Image (cartoon, rainbow, N blue to C red):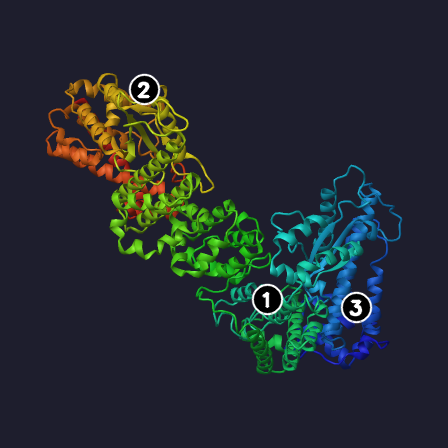
Amino acid sequence: MNRSLGERLVTAPRLSAPAAARRKLEALVGAPEGRDLAPLVAEGKARDLLLGLADHSPYLWALAGEDPARLARLLSHSPERALDALVAGLSRRMNDEAEAMRALRLAKRESALLIALADIGGVWDVVETTEALTRFADAAVGAALAFLVRQNALAGRLALDPEAPDLQAACGLTVLALGKHGARELNYSSDIDLIVLYDAASAAIPPGAEPAPLYVRITQALARLLQERTSDGYVLRVDLRLRPDPASTPVALSTLSAYAYYETLGQNWERAAMIKARPAAGDLELGDRFLADLSPFVWRKYFDYAAIADIHAMKRQIHAVRGHERVVVAGHDVKLGRGGIREVEFFVQTQQLIFGGRRPRMRGRRTLDMLKELYAEKWVTAEAVSDLTEAYGFLRTVEHRLQMVADEQTQRLPFERADLARFARFCGYGRLESFARDLTFHLTRVETHYARLFEDAPALSVASGSLVFTGVTDDPATLATLRRLGFQHPEAAAETIRGWHFGRRAGVRSPRAREVLTELTPALLEAFAGSGDPAAALAAFDAAMAHMTASVELLSILRSNERLRELFGDVLGSAPRLAEVIASRPHVLDAAIDPDRTIDFEDSFREEATRLRAETYVGQARNFEDALDRARDFAAEEMFLIGLNLLSGRLDPDRAGQAYSALAAAMVGALLKRVAADFAQDHGVIAGGRVAVLAMGKLGSREMTAASDLDLILIYDFPETAGESDGARPLGPGVYYARFTQRLLAALTAKTRRGALYEVDMRLRPSGRKGPLATQFSAFARYQRDEAETWEHMALTRARIVAGEASLAAEATKAIRATLTRRRDPGEVAREVTTMRALIAREKGESDPWDLKLVKGGLMDIEFVAQYLALAFGHDRPDILDVSTRAAIDKAGRAKLLDSRHVETLLEAHRLYTDATQFMRLAISGPFDPKTAASGVKRRIAASSGFPDFEAFIAALDERRRKVRETYEAVLKG
């Protein structure tokens, strides 16, 4: 150990351009400042080593040449003592930032040269080299922090004596080193991975001061002091992104908040990272206490087989396809590629995670030490230890040589043969073939042992490439895979997925949810890619998880069924609103693969079939509250199925509207029966009393969408001789039916634990909001005959009974028909219709082109034409009456009440508008805005209407609106 570095040199690189190297060396020793160096390199290994630096490493040769006297000193002294002196020199007091910056950088340059000479010259092996690199890093971080703590103490920002001998120990802040730095295995040009924590109750915090901003500023200054490039270079690149959720947290965290994060949201890769964590600077005792408290998170009490599935998924994400990143030489990444350094580390760390909870001896930080311990505990073979130890030493040496060329943080071998041959000589090989043989030998052995570790892992059928979302940085291969999958901004997609693993969404805050998610992610991304708009699908899924309280159920369903994954991806890309249903009720997906619903597909959505299913399902409820929950479950599943079949094209928009309407009528009928039974238990019944529910609007015309509300009127009747109800709490008929209606309204609208059912609008009842909720039949008939205005009769053209007592339904239908077939003056009807349309235009507007109902030339114009014809000519041609707008127009055309070209215009436009509206309401919540709508949604809307793209669809809408308004004016004014 006392012998000088020059005396102990045993190896040197092979030369590629010896003549040029000799000229460089001669110029160096021939200069006046090189006179002390000349005798040391006249011959022998020192000369060979410097020739190798001159030939292969511009960085090291620059360090050698900038200060020949320093080089001579390093060669003339023991490298261990030289490093000791260098580290000791960093502990001296530095008075200002400029002095600190320069001192740290000069020390870095000297340490880089010293360690490279000892490494390349064979004086230190890989373990000693990485230990030396780590010693300097610790000293540099400690010196920088000591300077900053003293400066803050002098400024009064820390309540410390600036002249105290060990300010760091009392500063209330600890710097944890992770990764290779934490394991004392630092590589030559590595970043240092740091986590900075503080004690929020430290005595170093002045009274009244906020600790977070104080320690954040110190941390930011520490990073700048170490990594800012000046004319003297830099000290160390600092990476603070291994802290908890770095995208959402400050660079310094309190120990309490960090502990809370790991306890609730910590991931298995973070457990693996914390294996290597150790306090490197600041209050070391605070760091030790934190890691001791965190030990149960890292080291589970029992053999942690629960983590194996997550670890398997992590491994399969790294190499999702056999052959990806094959064992090659040219361009191979000796760290991340197959058979590389990461696989040796992963081989050790995963087994430490699994077994370390019961085997404290397996909790060490150093890779090779723990490899031996795995053998001692009989978890691996002696062959594995020997092979992996040799490979690790070889690959770390190659890694260092790559980084010594230009002080670059790289682990990738050159691609070109000439460059690769040159690099092989830097590693001491005379021929490229010999280097390639040895490299391939070690990579293959690592890959073999690594594969055996995971040989029982289930296969992953993802054909797109590598997908790695552990850690905090973007993996280039993952970004390339995401780009191939259709993500135009893969960095944003990767950050979104990492956010799930950090628990930024409510639905993935449980460890189990994140474990299932890790397993599912590659297949889920392929499903998103199949949607045609993967970015929109990902965004919709991300938004859904933000509102989910738990996602394990949904994720497990998707993991187990490829068909449902594809379906879900399609829904996310083209119908985010439908995806929200899945997120809130994952088991609606079960209905998508129910064979009973696929065999009798057409019949299953018809009115009678829907009514029977609804009554059976709701009728099985144990009590009234259960009936409300079951109604909501049933409706959610049915609406999802209708939407799904509309999306897939199995239901056209007309049939979907009929199916939505059949469902609503069935729910009204089922709940009407349940409310009647429940109400009778409290109040009895009115002798001879009858009830019927009249539907208006889109439910009446069977044109409902996924977002339609219900326009209802409850009609009741009872004999004149009827008295109070016969129950325990009797009520008179008027009060009885008013309260009955309130109960039905609540059953339809109340938000229970299963969510909401429908919004109900009862403003179309006689006298509107001023009138009673329930309407006696005689009053209804009299009102329609004597008091109702024309606009109320217009609404009545789409009225039909959807539930209740058959005899009352028949009487109400007859009364409605009598009202609609009354003789009227067509001119007067036309004037009142146009007045009403103008009033609506003034109050609600008619200029929004995407409000397909109210816009000029939109649905309302078509409906008003149909309603005008029904009222104006219903007396003479009652056959034209129909609740369906389209059917009414068609019948009016057949009756020669409309010109054929007007019929064609109105029918074509009505179909286009209703088709588009069905998809808009299915796809999104709220008003449709093409500026914010996903491309998949717009593409689906256009395709549903038979157009090749959204631009063609817009052009068709413009043309239809113009023609409809012309027709409206021609008919009403004519």
Residue 305 is labelled as 1
For the residues labelled 1 and 3, say whether their Cβ atoms are less than 8 Å apart.
no
Residue closest to the eye, 101 or 514: 514
- Depth check: give the residue in front, 187 or 346: 346
Q: Is mark 3 on a helix, strand or loop?
A: helix
Rendering coords of residue 602 (x, y %): 25, 50
- Of the two numbered discs 2 and 3 on the same chain, state the one appearing first in sequence: 3
**Residue 620's image quarter?**
top left
Say left or right for 5 vs 553: right
Q: Which amino acid does label 2 sit on?
A: Ser
Mark 1, secondary structure of its residue: helix
Tell me, yes or no, whether the two marked residues, 1 and 2, touch with CB atoms within 8 Å.
Answer: no
Q: In which quarter of the image is residue 662?
A: top left
In the image, is residue 87 above or below residue 802?
below
Q: Mark 3 points at which residue?
A: 68
Is 723 left, or right, of 541 in this rendering? Answer: left
**Disc number for residue 767:** 2
Of the 4 image quadrants, the one containing the N terminus is bottom right
Amino acid at dot 1: Tyr
